[in-house]
Image (spheres, rainbow, N blue to C red):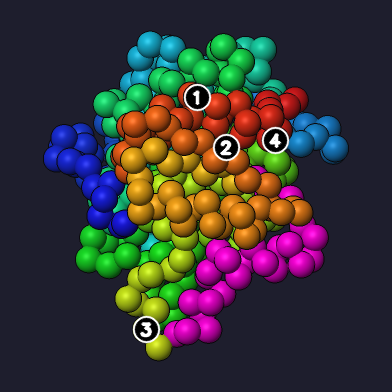
Amino acid sequence: MRKALFRPVIALIALTVLVTTAGCGTSASQASPIRFGGPQAGPALHTTPAKRSLVQWPTRPITFEEESRVGGAGEDTPIGVTTLRGPKSGVTGKVWVWAPPEYYEKRNAHKGFPVMEVLPGSYGYPVNYWTGADLKLQENLARWSRNGSSLPFIVVMPVLNPDDKHYYDGSDIPGRPKTGTWLSQDVPDLVRQNFRTLRTRDAWAIMGSSSGGFAALKNVLQHPDTFKVAIPNGPDILPDSPLWSGHAEEKRENNPEVLARRLMARGGPDVYLAFQDGSREHTVLPKVRRFIAQYGHGPVHTRLQIVPGGTHSAETYVRGLGEGTMRWVSAHMQGPTA
């Protein structure tokens, strides 16, 4: 299913410009610079938190390039972009970030916020289509937060793969770029360095569609110490990259079915899988139902949002988020905390 969610990217590529070195293993343009942490973010960075505070203060804030603004309920908040050279994975790729309107409010200046990492489908390179104004993901999240059906999430949107020639299953395939480490360590570290976050897995979610849905599903089961919640949209269930050839054991270690069985056998920690599928996804939906029937027990909590008339598309999954998924996800996560 990795090609089914490929979206036109010409407009987004045109918006993305070359970047220059800005430290911390990242680079950013000098045009329209923005910061989400540091002196421009207000006094919170300079306040010494209580020893028991859940708040993770920005540690090494950098300058991002402003890519666009989120209108409507998004209140003209910026989407920033940088090029991250992953110090742990060795992967280099663009990462887009956005903070909700509540993040900038004075009353929340000393609060950490929950984070959602959002992955595209197909090869997910060289852009992440979730940044697109056509999908209005950020605007909808802001609206749902205002009406109480979602927590206000910081959203981080990395490229899924380091190129458009291969698909790496969001995993560390031997001899290949370590995309598993990129998604589970380098990208979260970038967020912690630049935003007020929380020192708990209860405040971290990962969402993806199609091939990105597989990566979201696998990473929450493989790294429940980092992520508590996954939103797999029309996901692949099993690893299927041809690059696993000759590496059967490593492939097994990145199989969500194997990982779910292990999590169940050791009794936790609890993870929450909010599957989404369109009612017309006749190939994917039966596989998702089987996974839920077999592994949705004990510490593996599952929910399936079926979008009426929906197809294997990002537009379908945005609808599903507003029809119940975000409310269920938010009920199991930590909200902004001082």
Element at label 3: loop
Q: Position of residue 219 (x, y in %)?
A: 55, 58
Neighbour tally class for label 2: few under 14, some 14-19, many 20 plus, Cα within 10 Å: many
Quarter assignment of residue 123: bottom left
Circle 1 crowding by C-alpha within 10 Å: few under 14, some 14–19, many from 20: some
Q: Main secondary structure of the magenta part?
A: helix
Would residue 130 be seen by someone viewing this image from the given angle? no
Q: Amino acid at mark 2?
A: Val
Q: Identify the amino acid type marked 4.
A: His
Task: Measure the alpha-carbon separation of dots 3 and 2.
Answer: 34 Å
Near-viewer residue (227 or 57): 227
Identified by mark 3, the residue type is Ser
Mark earlier in primary sequence (1, 4): 1
Mark 4 lies on a secondary structure that is: loop
Can you tell which mark lies on residue 323? 1
Residue 54, placed above or below residue 180: above
- The residue stretch that appears in magenta: 247-272
Which of the marked residues, 4 or 3, is nearer the chain's N terminus? 3
Q: Nearer the viewer, mark 3 or mark 1?
A: 1
Query: Which numbered circle lies on residue 245?
Result: 3
